[in-house]
Amino acid sequence: MPFALETVGATVHFGGIYAVNEVSLRVEKGARHALIGPNGAGKTTLINLLTGVLQPSAGKILLEGNDITGLAPHRRVGLGLTRTFQINQLFGDLTPLETIGLAVSERMGSGGDWWRVAGSRPSVDKQIVEILERFHLADVMLERTATLPYGKQRLLEIAVAIACRPQVLLLDEPAAGVPEDERHEILASVAALPKDVTVLFIEHDMDLVFSFADRISVMVNGALFTEGTPDEVANDARVKAVYLGEDVVDE
Amino acid sequence: MLTILFDGVAYGMLLFVLACGLSVTLGLMNFINLAHGTFAMAGGYVAVVVVNRLGVPFFAALPLAFVIPAVLGVILERTIYRPVYARSHLDQVLFTIGLVFMSVAAVDYVAGSQQVFIQLPRALEGQFNVFGVGIGKYRLLIIVICGLIGVALQYALVHTRFGSRLRAAVDDPRAARGLGINVNVVFAITFAVGSGLAGLGGALGAEILGLDPQFPLKFMIYFLIVVAVGGTSSVTGPFLASLLLGISDVAGKYYVPKLGAFVIYTIMIVVLLWRPQGLFSRGSTR
Amino acid sequence: MIGPGSGSLTAAVAYHLARRAHWRGLEIAFWAITLLTIFLLPGKHLILTEIAILGLFALSLDLLIGYAGVLSLGHAAYFGFGAYAAGLFAKHGIIGEPFFALLAAGLATAALGFATSFLVLRGSDLTRLMVTLGVSLVLREIANRYDGLTGGADGLQGITVAPLFGRFAFDISGHVAYVYSLAVLFILFLVARRIIYSPFGLSLRAVKGNPLRAAAIGIGVNWRLVWIYTIAAAYAGIAGALLTQTAQFCSLDVLSFDRSADLLVVLILGGTGYLYGGLIGAILFKLAQDWIAGITPQYWQFWIGLTLVVIVLVGSERMAGLLGPIRKLVQKA
C-alpha cells in the first residue's frame, strides 16, 4: 500500500546552499507525523516543496503513490493535499464566512461558477456551518478577517485548510504566536481531526509534539537526521545534542 | 551599417543617462516615478533658454541643465513626494501621472507647443569621416559624455562609501537604517542626482530626440522599458539595456520603417514575459 | 444575532451569504433616477450618452483593478479596438445593423483580451503597468501606420450607422443614442453584478487579496485572471463601439494614453471595488470636464493633473471617506 505522502531524494539548492538535501520522507496514511529540528533546518522549505510553491532541483514527490512533482500548487489541493502557513496567510478583506464559503465552493467545483449567487446552495451552507462551529468561528463569522484577534485568525488558518477536505494536511507551526490561553483551542481542533486524514506538522512546542505525534522526523541542515517513535526520539542523545548544541558523546 | 550602429549606441547612451535615475528610484524606494521625464524636459528647456536667449555657450549650459533639475528634484522630493512613498503602486502611478500632466500643460502654456531647438556650436556640426564611416560629431560628443557618466556612476557605486551605503539601502532599507545609514538622505541625494542626469540627458537629447512639451509623455515608455529590461539593482543593467534598445530602435526604424517602432515594444513584451524581473537584474520582482 | 444550535446558524449563514447580492435601496434609486433622465432631461441626452459610455468603460477597468487587483495603464487598447471594429463594420457594410455590430465588436475585443491576458499573469505591478501600456501603444502605432484602413490621424471618415434594429434611426439630438447606450450599460451592469456576487467573483477578491493563499485553497489563479481580463476587455470594447456608433466617428484618440489616464481619474473620483465607482466617477468627471472646458478649454490636462495630485496627497482613503457613507450604504443597507 503506498504511503500517503512520500519524497524520494528531494533536493532544493540555490546558489550553492542546500536548503533541502536528499530528503526521503515517508508518511503513513492516518499518521500524526511531526517534523522537528532547529531553526533553518529546511522544514518550511520542505513543506513548500511538498505543496508545489517550490520546485525541487532533484527528486520526486509522491501523493498516495502518484507523482505530483510537476503539478501546480492549486492542482495538488484538488488531489487532497492542503497546508497552513507559519505566518497567517488569510484574505484580510473577506470575512471568515466568505473565506470558508470560498474554500468549500472551490472544493465542490463551483469556483468557476459566475452566475449563481455564492451561498445559494444548501449543501455548501451546511458544510460551512460545520466548519465554523468546529473551529469556534461562528461568533466572528461576519467580521473582516484583518480585524480578528490573532488566535481567531490562527483558527481560521487551520479551518480553511480543513474546509478543503484534505487527505493529507500539512501544518506549519500551528500554535506559533498564539497566546498561552488560546493554545488549547488550537490543540483541541488539531487533535479532533478525522482519523483517516494524514497530518504532517512542524512544531517547536515539544509538549504539543509529544502529546500528539505518533512518529517524529528530525531535520538538521536540510537533511533528515533521524526518525522514529516519540519515545525513541526523546531518548536519542544525538537529538538532544543537536538542539542543545552539546558535543555528542561517543559511547 | 556601422553608422547605424554608431547612431544606435549614441541613442542608447542617451537613454541610459535619461533613465538611470528612474532605475535607482524604483530599486531604492520601490517608487514608480512616471514623472521622471519631467526633469528631462526641464533640463532641455533650461538649456534652450540659456543658450538661445541668454547667449550662454553650449558647454556651459550643460552643467546648468544638470543642476537646475537636480535642485527641482530635491525640492519636490522633500515636499510632495515624501508622503507618497508608503502608498500603493496605483497611488504612485496616479500621483506621478498627475505631475506629468501638470508639467506638460504648464510648459505648453509658457513656451508654446512647438518643438524647440538649441543653437549648437559650429564645432559640433557635421561629421568626421573615419574609414568611410560617417561619425556625427554631435553624436560622438554624446557617446563620450554619457560614457564618462556611466563609468563615473559605476565607480561611485562600487568604490565609494556613498555607493556602498546606496547599495545597502537598495538591498534592505530597514537593515541599512539599523546600521546607521541615513536612508532618507541617501535617497534625497540619489533622487537629486538622478533628476539632474535626466535634465542633462534632456539637454543633450534635444537635437536627437526632439524637445517639446509632450516629451515626458512621449518618452515615458522608453524610460520604463530601460528600467524593466535592465532591472533596478545595478548601473550596468540599465546601461546594457539602453544600448540594446537604442541599437534595436535605430536599426529597426532604418531597415523596416513601417514596423520600426514596434521593435522596441516587442522586445519589451518578450523580455518581460521571459524574465519579469528584467534581463540583467539579480533580484526578485518587487 | 446568531442564536445557538446548528439550525439557526445554517439559516444565518445562508441569509448572510445571500444578502450580499440583495439589491439595496440606494441602488434601485440610482437606476430609477437614471431611467427618469430619459424623460426629464431630453436636452442633455448628448452628454448623458457620453457619461453612460464612460461609465461602462470605467466599470470594465474597475473589474480589473478593484476586483482582480490587476493594474493596467493601457485599457484604452480595448476601448479603441472595439471602437475601430464597430467603425469598420459600419463603414464597409460588413455588419449593417448596429446592435449586431456591437456584439461582434465585443466578441472581437474579447478575443484580443484573451490573447493578451497572459501578459499580465506574471510579474510585479510595474511589469503589468508597462506591459499594458506597451500593448496600447503598439495598437495605437498600428492604427497610425495602417492609415489606409483606419484613416490614420484624420480618423475613420464616412461612417453612417444604420437604424437600430432596422427601426430606430440615430437622431441629431441623441435620444435614440442615449436610450441605446443606457440599455447596453444597464444589461452589462447586471451581468457584472451577477459575476461579482458569484463564487467566481469571490475568488477574484481572494486572488487580489492573497494570491498565495488563493492557490493554497485550490484556486487556479491564472485562469481566473485570464477570464476576468477577457471580460473586462469585452466590456471596454463594447463601450468603444458604442462611442463610434453614437458619434458616427472614430479617431486615434480612442487609443491614446490620455484615455487610459482619464479612466484612472474617473475611478479615483468614484472609488474602486464596489461597481458603482465607475458610474459615479464618470458622472463627476464629465460634469467637471464640461464646467472646466467652459473656463479654460485648452488646459484641461493641467486640471486633471492637479486633481490627481491633490487626491493622492489628501489620501484616497479620505476621498473614499467623502464618498464612504454612500459606499457603505450601497454595500450594507
Image (cartoon, helix red, strand yellow):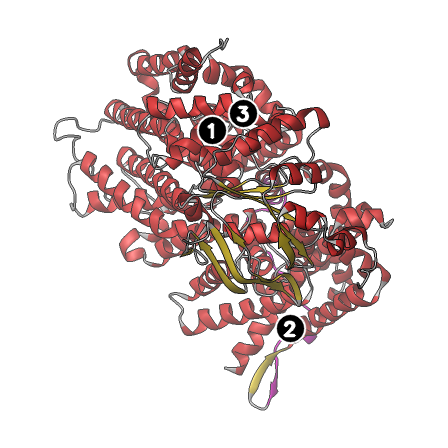
Mark toward the start of the polypeptide (1 vs 3):
1
Tag in front: 1 or 3: 3
Q: Nearer the viewer, residue B3 or C134?
A: C134
Report the side of C172 relative to C8 (left or right).
left
User: Residue A207 at x, y = what percent?
Assistant: 70, 37
**Residue nearest the viewer, comparing A74 with A84:** A84
Q: Quadrant for the C terminus of chain A, please.
A: bottom right
Name the residue rendered at 58%, 46% in the picture: B112
Q: Which residue is labeled 1 in the image?
A: A100
Measure the alpha-carbon separation of dots 1 and 2.
67 Å
Q: Residue at x 66, y 36 (%)?
A: A208
Q: Chain of mark 1?
A: A
Please rate how many residues cluster around mark 1, counting C-alpha atoms within 10 Å: few if below 14, some from 14 to 19, many from 20. Answer: many
The residue tagged 3 is: A135
Q: Chain of mark 3?
A: A
User: What are the residue bounds of the magenta stretch?
Assistant: B101-130
Q: Amino acid at mark 3?
A: Phe
Q: Residue at x 56, y 19 (%)?
A: A140
- Single out the residue that lies furthest toward the bottom: B131
> Quick check: B136 above or below C192?
below
On what subunit does the disc labeled 2 rest? B
Q: Is residue C122 magenta?
A: no
Q: Quadrant of residue C22?
A: top left
Which mark's residue is nearer the viewer, 2 or 3?
Answer: 3
SS assignment at label 1: helix
User: Is disc 2 in contact with disc 3, using a CB cutoff of under 8 Å?
Assistant: no
Residue under pointer 2: B138
